Amino acid sequence: MSERLPPILIIGGGLAGAFCALKLAPLPVAIIAPAPVGDSGASRWAQGGIAAAVEEGDTPESHAKDTVAAGAGLVDHDIALGMAREARTRVEELAAMGAPFDRTAQGVFAPSREAAHSRHRIVRVKGDSAGRAIMETLRQQVERTPSIERLEGYAAQEIVTQDGRVTGVRVRDDDGNLRFLPCAALVLATGGLGHLYRITTNPLDAKGVGVAMAARAGALIADAEFVQFHPTAIDIDVDPAPLATESLRGEGATIIDRAGHRFLLEIDAAGELAPRDIVARAVFASIRAGRGAFLDARASVGATFPDRFPTVYASCRAAGLDPVVSPIPIAPAAHYHMGGVWTDAQGRTSLKGLWAIGEVASTGVHGANRLASNSLLEAVVFAARAAADIRHAELAAITQPSAPVSGAAAGRSSDDLAIVEELRDLMSANVGVIRDAAGLAGALNELRRLRARASDIEIVNMLTVSTLIAAAAYARRESRGAHFRADHPAPDPAQALRSRLTLEMALRIADEAHP
Ligand SMILES: Cc1cc2nc3c(=O)[nH]c(=O)nc-3n(C[C@H](O)[C@H](O)[C@H](O)COP(=O)(O)OP(=O)(O)OC[C@H]3O[C@@H](n4cnc5c(N)ncnc54)[C@H](O)[C@@H]3O)c2cc1C
C-alpha cells in the first residue's frame, strides 16, 4: 500500500464501485476490496441482465410504471423515473467500454422480457452471462485507468468520523492487521447481505457490513425490513445455494410436497407462476410444516433438461441428483436487499463525506419489492450520479496520515464462528419469509444476547445490520411486498411509507419489544 492514498476511497469492487471509480477519472481514487475488481460481489453472478427501455416503442415512463407497481406502494416515483430515463445512456456507456450485449442482425440491442416488465427490456449477454461479461469489461477498464489505485485483500470494518463528518475508514488485511485510511470522501459500494440468512444465493462477502458501518457511524438506514427471497434455490446443502431458474416454472415445472401434492394452486390461481413473494411463502410454509418442497420438471422438461438448463442440471448432478427422473429439493433463499443506507438522488447519505451506491444503498427505487434486473441498473445510474456529486463537492482536507491501528481489535474466536451459525438460523426462522411479532421480538432479544458474546468486529457488524432488519420488521405491523407478517397479513394504507431508522432507534425498538 502506498503511503499517500487518494482522497476519495471506494469500498467495494463490484459494478457500483468500479463504475463510480471510472466515472471519477481522472480524479485519483482507490478501490478497497477483498479481491480484484469484479472477482468478489454479486455483480459477476447476475444472469438476467440490466433493465433499460431500449426496445422500439418502450419508454422510460413505462419502465418507471412497472418499477412502481412492483414496489407495492413504496417506490419514490420521481427517483424511479429519473433512473429509467438514464438507463439507455448508462447501458450505451457500458457497451462503449466493451460489454458485448446481445444485438439483432441490424446491430440494435435485443432485449428479452422478465417477470413484471410490460416490455422486452432486459439487456443481456449470451442469454445468461451479463454479470460476468460486464464485470470483465469493467475490470479491464479499471486496470487501464491510471487514476484508479486498487487495494486488494482489504475488508473495511469501521467508518471513522469527527464532528459529524467522515474522516476515514478502518480496514483489515488478509493477515488480520488493522489500518486506518484517511479520506475526504468515502463511497460505500459493499453490496448485499444474503449471508445473514441460512440459505442465500449471494456470494460469501454479502454480509451487510456497509449498512452496519454506516449505521454505527450514525447514518440513516431506510427500508431495512425489505429482503427479497428467491423462491426456488436448490436445497442441497451448498452455500451459497444455486438457483433453479424461474424459466423452469415458465416451462411448466410444478412445485410439489413430499407426498407429490401440488400445493400452490390452493394458494394462488396462477399456481407456480404467482409473484415471487407468494411462491416463496408457500414453499417456506410447506417446508416449515415438515412436508418439504420440490420442483418437479420430470413431465414438462424431462430428457431435454441437460440441453435446455445446463447450469441447473450441473448443480443437481454435482449433488448426486438427476432432475430428469427426480424432483429437485428447493427452499427460498435470501437474494436481494431493497433497503440499505438512505441516500438522496445523488447517492449522498445523511452523513457528511459519505456516499452509498448499489445494493448497499436505499435510493427509493425498489420500494417493498425489486423489479427484476433493476439492481444492476441502479448500481450504474447512482454510481455515475455519486461520481458527479463528489466531483463538485467541497471535500474536507485530510489531516491524519494513513497508519496502522495499534491495540488492534480482538481477533475472531471459535465462539464468533458459532455466533454466525446461530445468527443465520435465527434470521431465517424469525426474520425471514414469514414473520410475526413474537418471532421478531424473540430475534431482537437473541441478537442482543449474541452481541454480548461477540468479540470480532465483523460479527458485530453482522449482528448490527440484523438488528436493523428485525427492528424495522417489528415496527412495520402490516404485510407489504417482500415483508410478510403472519399477524398482520394485509397491507395497511396508513403504513404506506418508507421506513427510516438510526441504530439508536432500532435499539430502542428492540428494548420495547423485549424489555
Ligand atoms: C445469483 C444472482 C443473480 C442476480 N441476477 C441479477 C440480474 O440478472 N439483474 C440484476 O439487475 N441484478 C441481479 N442480481 C442482483 C445484483 O447482482 C446485485 O444487486 C448487484 O450486482 C450489486 O452490485 P454492487 O456493486 O452494489 O455489489 P457487489 O457486486 O455485490 O459488490 C460488492 C463489493 O463490495 C465488496 N465488499 C463487501 N464487503 C466489504 C468490506 N467490508 N470491505 C471491502 N469490500 C467489501 C465485495 O467484495 C464486492 O467487491 C443477482 C444477484 C444474484 C446473487
Image (cartoon, helix red, strand yellow):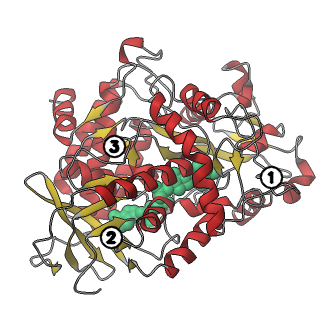
Rendered position, 372 above or below 398: above
Q: Position of residue 460 (x, y in %)?
A: 24, 56
Residue under label 2, please give it.
155
Rendered position, 174 above or below 481: below
Badge nearest the viewer, 1 or 3:
3
Q: Name the disc covering residue 198, or none.
A: none
Q: Residues within 10 Å of mark 1 (few under 14, many from 20)?
A: many
Q: Position of residue 25 (x, y in %)?
A: 42, 70
The CA span between labels 1 and 2 is: 39 Å
Residue under label 3, please give it.
343
Rendered position, 25 above or below 118: below
| Amino acid marked by disc 2 | Ala
Is 499 placed left or right of 277 in the picture? Answer: left
Q: Position of residue 282 (x, y in %)?
A: 61, 29
Q: Name the disc covering residue 323, or none.
A: 1
Q: Residue furthest right?
A: 303
Q: Secondary structure at mark 1?
A: loop
Q: Residue at x 26, y 37 (%)?
A: 444
Is 10 placed left or right of 453 in the picture? Answer: right
Q: Mark 2 and mark 1 in contact (Cβ < 8 Å)?
A: no
Image quadrant in which you'd find residue 259: top right
Find out if the beta carbon at label 1 lies less than 8 Å from the nearest ligand 1 atom: no
Rendered position, 438 above or below 121: above
Q: Residue at x 18, y 38 (%)?
A: 507
Q: Residues within 10 Å of mark 2 (few under 14, many from 20)?
A: many
| Amino acid marked by disc 1 | Pro
The CA span between labels 1 and 3 is: 44 Å
Nearest to N terminus: mark 1 or mark 3: 1
| Amino acid marked by disc 3 | Thr
Nearest to N terminus: mark 2 or mark 3: 2
Q: Residue at x 58, y 67 (%)?
A: 135
